[in-house]
Amino acid sequence: METVVKKRIKQVLKGDQDAYAEVVEIYKDKVFQICYRMLGNRHEAEDIAQEAFLRAYVNISSFNIELKFSTWLYRIATNLCIDRIRKKKPDYYLDAEVAGTDGLNMYSQIPSDTRLPEEDVESLELQEIIQREISKLPEKYRLVIVLKYIEELSLNEISETLDLPLGTVKTRIHRGREALRNQLRYV
Amino acid sequence: MKCPAEIILYMHEYLDEEISAEHEKELRAHLQNCKECQNHFHELKKTIALVQSTSHIQAPDHFTASVMAKLPKERHKVGVQRWFRQHPLLTAASLFLILMMGSLISSWDQDHQLSVSKQPNLVVQNDKVIVPEGEVVKGDVVVKNGKLEIHGEIDGDVTVINGEVINGEQYMASAGKVTGEIEEVNAIFEWIWFHIKNASKEIINVFDADDKDTDKEK
Ligand SMILES: [Zn+2]
């Protein structure tokens, strides 16, 4: 698949705009998925996923053709997601970590409506619950969990995509798993 | 709780499939005897299974079309320029055909007058241009609507349009007499081609001049 993609990218570099459609077609679901899992809503996810493809196109000449295109594209997409989440933050502070609660965030401490009452758990679709709990993770943990367990990237690929040392990626995955364990243990 | 702190770490090493045989042995041994850690480990594995169970969602149907519609249009122009740069001959041909076709065809039809490039030692007789024996003509010689007889030497290219080069055994034998290339142009398409080639040479020069950086990148 990477070879087809590289062929198309070379065409795009030569000015063949239409060749880009196939590149979008190949990666649209994966990019959309990352954005959806990060942002938790389809509308925003579509917005950001399109923006990611647009940025990739405009900056295509800076892409090193020797590298994996997906890694580069996912990096653009994840950066855009993080930006979007940070812009929303002043309104919510949901992702702010509370001192001394490793991996937990304010959500865990907000009572009533934002926290799922146990009796409602069963009435919700399991899918929704999981997505909801993923959304509650601090973004840096959410990101690695999504890339690892939903996009199924290897630890090395995640490290390349996020431009983070492998050790940092591992630590974040460990903490992300622990945080999620706490959130999903009663499901 | 008396559980060693590293047991949790070993669980994560196990989940990342990066656990050493030694650690794995230790982890298994501990889990045999510790309900609490067993439970913790089970919850971690359940968590992963739950996350992995989320169905893969797909981008909306119109997604690709929307992206394509948003791409900046000016890139297209850049693309066209790039195409021209990579195909100077075709570019020259199309430009030439568009701009010059009309006037060129009429000039081919109407212009039957003998004309020749201006070199002092060329001799013109009726429809014939002669390079006299012992003479050396400097520069390119172009003869239109006439014949060219070479007895002496030409230090340059020879182009004969709508005519011919006369020389005992064709000009092959007189290769020594013409230092450059000899070309006969006798049909309308050759005539056009002759112009295209000249035009594209010029265009290539123009692009080469402003495109040296691109070449280096390749
Ligand atoms: Zn234990």
Image (cartoon, coloured by chain):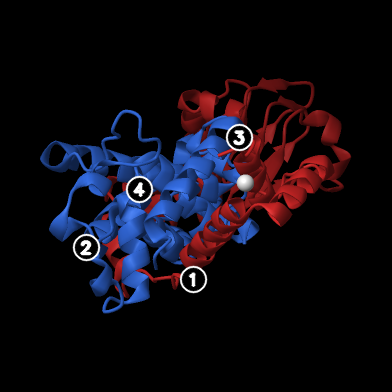
Chain colours: A blue, B red
Secondary element type, mark 4: loop
**What is the distance, in whole Å, between disc 3 and disc 1 at their CAs?**
30 Å
Amino acid type for the residue under numbered disc 1: Ser
Amino acid type for the residue under numbered disc 2: His
How many numbered dots are placed on residues in this image?
4
Q: Mark 3 or mark 1, which has the lower sequence index?
A: 3
Q: Which mark is residue A137?
A: 4
The answer to the question of whether label 4 and label 1 lie on touching residues, with beta carbons closer than 8 A, is: no
**What is the distance, in whole Å, between disc 2 and disc 4 at their CAs?**
20 Å
Amino acid type for the residue under numbered disc 4: Leu
Q: In this orientation, which residue lies closer to the viewer: B75 or B4? A: B4
Q: Which mark is residue B5?
A: 3
Q: Are marks 4 and 1 on the same chain?
A: no
Residue B6 sits in which quadrant? top right
Q: Which residue is mark 1?
A: B53
Q: Residues within 10 Å of mark 2 (few under 14, many from 20)?
A: few
